Amino acid sequence: MKTSRRNFLAGLAPALNLVQSRPRGKVRVGVVGGNFGSSFQWHEHPDCEVAAVADLRADRRDRLSSTYRCSRTYSELQELIRDREVDAVAIFTPAPDHVAHAVAAMKAGKDVISAVPAAMDLEGCRELLDTVKKTGRIYMMAETGYYHPEIMTCRQWNKEGRFGTIFYSEAEYFHDLAGRRARQAGLMYTADGKPTWRYGLPPLRYITHCTGPVVSVTGERLTEVAAVGWGEDHETLRNNAYGNRFSNSVALFKTSGGNSARICIHWSIAMPSAERASFYGTEMSFQDPMPGGQPAMIGRPERKMEPWKHENHWELLPEPLRHASGHKGSHPFLTHEFVRAVVEQRPPAVNIHEALAFTVPGIIADRSAREGGAWMKVPEVG
């Protein structure tokens, strides 16, 4: 690590009140949530081992145990966080439970990586931030879009000044969850037909796959928003826990740098699933492809568009993790960043402040959509 980087992180640590002493040896991770949680590489990382796993369902506990070759299993998170052999907890439970589970783990003395979003409302965001400050534990949000290869490349390009000024960004998340197709995918409904936490979920409350790329590449915060929602006569919108009536939403943001960003999230769309982001600058632009379209393209003034030469960035990973896994290959990077942050006792890339900068804009955008597209300020929580 370069001296300047070390000094920068040392400056951040007091602000986050990080604890500086840990047991020597590998980071002992406890994994909670046997669906999405079984798709990471904790058992392959040279500085990590899986000490315990937990899930309410026996079949998912078995999946975690088999994947991570771990015989210590629990049926509840509370049991796992009392285990003294666990240093850190990877939380991949339903989104409405993220705050409660992350707070409980940190109060039990564990570092935490959590699935997205960080929280479902502003109260949850503030509770999460307050807990990080009071406990001094490391918190990371596992935003896959942050480590999409093209986003990693664009982030580096912007640091090098290649874009000039990025005056406009756009990001889109298409994930068709409508009707019969949702039942087949097992997303809004369980195998026996019961609603899951995704049933009726407001699209903009699940915004981090879009805000993660936009905020991290531009280096700007999203400060104001006006959003429009669209709904249909669908069972998930007639009666849901969120009081939501929108299947699809579009949000226009103003940024702290005086620029703009458009974000679309669609649950009902005749289009394959997609996560894409594009950045338009004064010297260079980058366009992510639509599903089934041309490859990612780079644009420059007075030149033809040229294809982006794909980079996997595997040189940044330990040898055992240099393979594709999950959401455009992002999972090994998330695994590595959290493990190294715990080992080095430093804020991770998607620390509590970045996690909230990705999450809060969606909460406010959903409010704007419910109020007919009114412009609203996005508070900077913390």
Image: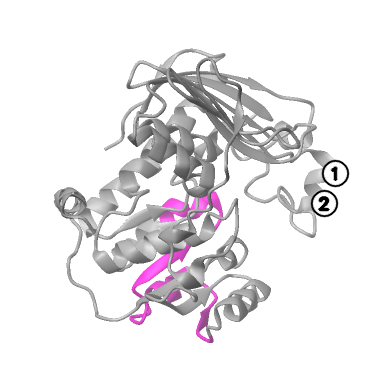
Give the amino acid type for the residue marked by disc 1 in the picture.
Arg
Q: Position of residue 37 (x, y in %)?
A: 56, 64
Relative placement, left or right, of 86 versus 333 is left
Q: Quadrant of the N terminus?
A: bottom left
Q: Quadrant of the C terminus?
A: top left
Q: In the rendered structure, does residue 97 fall within the stretch colored magenta?
A: yes
Give the amino acid type for the residue marked by disc 2 in the picture.
Gln
Q: Position of residue 66 (x, y in %)?
A: 62, 80
What residue is drawn where x is 46% and y is 32%? 214
Please identify the quarter of the rendering in which residue 152 is found. Answer: top left
What residue is drawn where x is 30% and y is 59%? 138
What residue is drawn where x is 57% and y is 37%? 308
Total numbered labels: 2
Residue at disc 1, secondary structure:
helix
Disc 1: which residue: 180
| 270 or 157, nearer to the observer | 157
Q: Which residues lie in the magenta part? A: 71-100
Visible residue check, residue 255: yes
Residue 188, above or below 253: below
- Residue 184: assigned label: 2
Q: CA distance from mark 2 to mark 1?
A: 6 Å
Q: Position of residue 136 (x, y in %)?
A: 22, 58
Q: Are marks 2 and 1 in contact (CB under 8 Å)?
A: yes
Relative placement, left or right, of 125 versus 346 is right
Task: Please rate how many residues cluster around mark 2, counting C-alpha atoms within 10 Å: few if below 14, some from 14 to 19, many from 20.
Answer: few
Residue 4, above or below 261: below
What residue is drawn where x is 34% and y is 73%? 87
Q: Position of residue 160 (x, y in %)?
A: 34, 35
Q: In the rendered structure, does residue 279 fall within the stretch colored magenta?
A: no
